[in-house]
Image: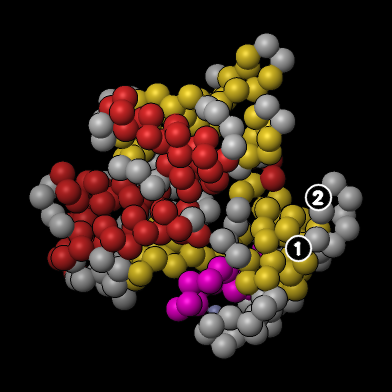
Amino acid sequence: LAIPGGGQDSPTRLTTMETLGATVLVCTPSYALHLLQVARERGVDPARLPVRVTLHAGEPGAGIPSVRARIEAGWGARAFDHGGMTEMGAYGYECEAQAGLHVNESEFVAEVIDPATGAPASEGELVLTNLGRLGSPLVRYRTGDRVRLARSPCGCGRTFARLEGGILGRLDDMLIVRGVNLFPSAIEAIVRRFPVEEFQIEIFRAGELDEVRVLVEVDGGADGARHVQDALRAGLGIRMEVAPVGPGSLPRFELKARRVVRR
Ligand SMILES: [Zn+2]
């Protein structure tokens, strides 16, 4: 039985899940995290609900280790990534080894190219051809998604290629900060290691250059923010300001999160 949650608010969805004993939760990674918070505010421990699997699409999150770990710990479940596009179809899934998105190569042909030159690459833009959609065939469709393709055998025994780390980001989401190419997902991977409830990446112009500031709802206020800032510097090699903001002050998202804001 699939229970549609559209049109309900978060407390109603939670109550429905509790009442019907839902065992699988399908949503964006951001919403899985948000629903955890809503549950705790209502005195419900989500790990005690019968949810055993969470399945995520729409954002990179489930392929980011720190995000996955937080979803799994909070829900007491295993979190799996899923890949699909409206125009292309559902082309990828994660197996029990959780070693990246397997491309369903009996239905899709996956190629990876350097987006600037079009030459084959191991990391670059994902190009897909669907073989099974008679009403919507797409041949060598440039997805705009950045991926890293692995053809080595998977622990699960499947031979389908894998996109390591899932979708790494949208090519047009890439930030250039003081000459360093940076995806918002790389920032999220580090921010989510800390007790950060929500965050936002602000891009603003400083002279001729783009600068980045990260706003965090973090335990520990200024000290907490400084720990995040140090980790970003160590992990990404660039200094960016991290500023603490009050709990609940940043927007929450039910569908695709929009955490990058240009000022
Ligand atoms: Zn596998």
Q: How many marks?
A: 2
Q: In the displayed structure, would residue 207 be above or below residue 94? A: above
Q: Residues within 10 Å of mark 2 (few under 14, many from 20)?
A: some
Q: How is the image coloured?
A: secondary structure
Is 135 colored magenta in this rendering?
Answer: no
Q: Which residues are magenta?
A: 88-103
Is 89 colored magenta in this rendering?
Answer: yes
Residue 257 visible in rendering: no
At x 16% / y 44%, what residue is drawn?
Answer: 41
- Nearest to the observer: residue 79 or residue 133: 79
- Nearest to the observer: residue 27 or residue 136: 27
Residue under label 1, please give it.
122
- The disc at residue 234 is none
- Nearest to the observer: residue 189 or residue 60: 189
Left or right, 197 with reference to 129:
left
Left or right, 180 with reference to 154:
right
* View extreme (left): residue: 43
The amino acid beneath tag 1 is Ser
The amino acid beneath tag 2 is Pro
Of mark 2 and mark 1, the one earlier in the sequence is: 2
Left or right, 149 with reference to 119:
left
Residue under label 2, please give it.
115
Q: Position of residue 231 (x, y in %)?
A: 46, 39
Q: Residues within 10 Å of mark 1 (few under 14, many from 20)?
A: some
Which of labels 2 and 1 is toward the front? 1
- Marks 2 and 1 sit apart, C-alpha to C-alpha, by 12 Å
Quarter of the image for residue 109 reads: bottom right
At x 56% / y 61%, what residue is drawn?
Answer: 165
Q: Position of residue 86 (x, y in %)?
A: 61, 59
At x 44% / y 27%, what residue is drawn?
Answer: 242
Q: What quarter of the picture does the N terminus occupy?
A: bottom left
